[in-house]
Amino acid sequence: MKLKQYIKIMLLTLPLTLLSCADNIIDAFELSGLYENGEAYQPHLEIFIFRGTQGFTLPDGETNAANYVVNLFNNGLTSVHKFMRQNDIAFYESDINIYYVKMGALIDTYFSGGLSSVSSLTLTDETGTFNKGTILIDYNKVVIFFAQSIHVDPSVSGFSVIGTGDTINNPSFRTQYRIAIGSNYFGSFEILRRTVSHELGHYFGLVHSFETTSCSLAPQGTTLRIMDYVTNAENFIGCEQSIAKNLASVYLQKTPFTAYTDGEGLDGIQGSISASKQSISSPTINTKKPKRSTSVI
């Protein structure tokens, strides 16, 4: 019998409490079927959803920001897994933490002014009304911010760094590794999951398909590549997959989906899974100065 699992969502009260999200139960066995040999690189996700004056705006008909965002990483081909599985990258529910936080300015202010200097954020509730203490940002994980507006240019709906092999596992540069997603994604879940996949592509070392440094240059808007600027993107091409997989291998260990331990989940939902193995190496003396990651949109 297949084990069902729960997604961890942080309810931002003090103390923080883990809740199950009954509407977003993931079948990890079905997820494993999307991946060759049933294994993948599995990053830990720290997701911060901004509420209040710069709160992430939901489309009409949606009422819960955490549920809406979690669906991006749900199993099957209706999530980012449709695209990220091409790079052998998967997201386990046991490795996803979601927080509501307050933000009082354009997130671009923090990116251009040095978000790396921001070590904590103010926790809040779904409405953004109450202060619930602070939380430290764990940049050792894949950090994603969901905000109303992320750039002075209102057409920008995604923002990320371009990962490199000599910075992604370097503690001195980890604070540069973050992704921001804005509400101005045309209110379409399909475009949103492509936007998130596009920024994750940058995170794992990919540039735009139309940039001269692309592994396979093509004019903008002429392909179905995730790294192009098109709303119906479908794929990472072979050379992009190789780059992303290589960078993921520097940062993560490939983990089988079958690494289960029997257990009772919250609210009686069965199953728990061993966390993916992710670590940051200790600083080492190196005479070669690491290259800085480049912020892109």
Image: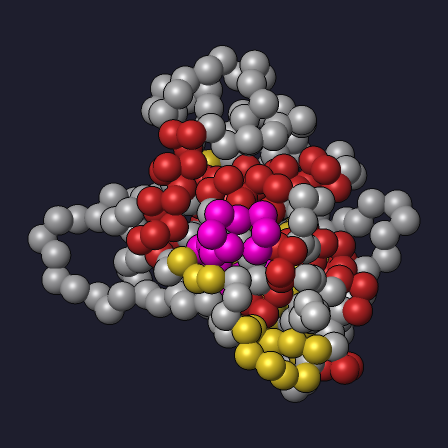
Q: Is residue 105 visible?
A: no
- State yes or no: residue 109 in magenta: no
Residue plotted at (51% across, 74% down): 274
Residue 6 sits above or below residue 166 on the image: below
Residue 202 sits above or below residue 248 on the image: above
Identify the residue at the far right of this view: 61
Q: Position of residue 231 (x, y in %)?
A: 67, 27
- State yes or no: residue 38 in magenta: yes
Residue plotted at (61% across, 34% down): 156
Q: Is residue 228 visible?
A: yes
Q: Position of residue 278 (x, y in %)?
A: 39, 66
User: Colour mode?
Assistant: secondary structure
Horizontal side, residue 13 vs residue 117: left or right: right
Which portion, as a residue range, is magenta? 32-48
Residue 135 sits in quarter: bottom right
Residue 163 sits above or below residue 90 on the image: above
The residue nearer to you, when weighing 231 against 121, is: 231
Horizontal side, residue 70 vs residue 64: left or right: left
Residue 176 sits above or below residue 102 on the image: above
| Picture quarter with the N terminus | bottom right
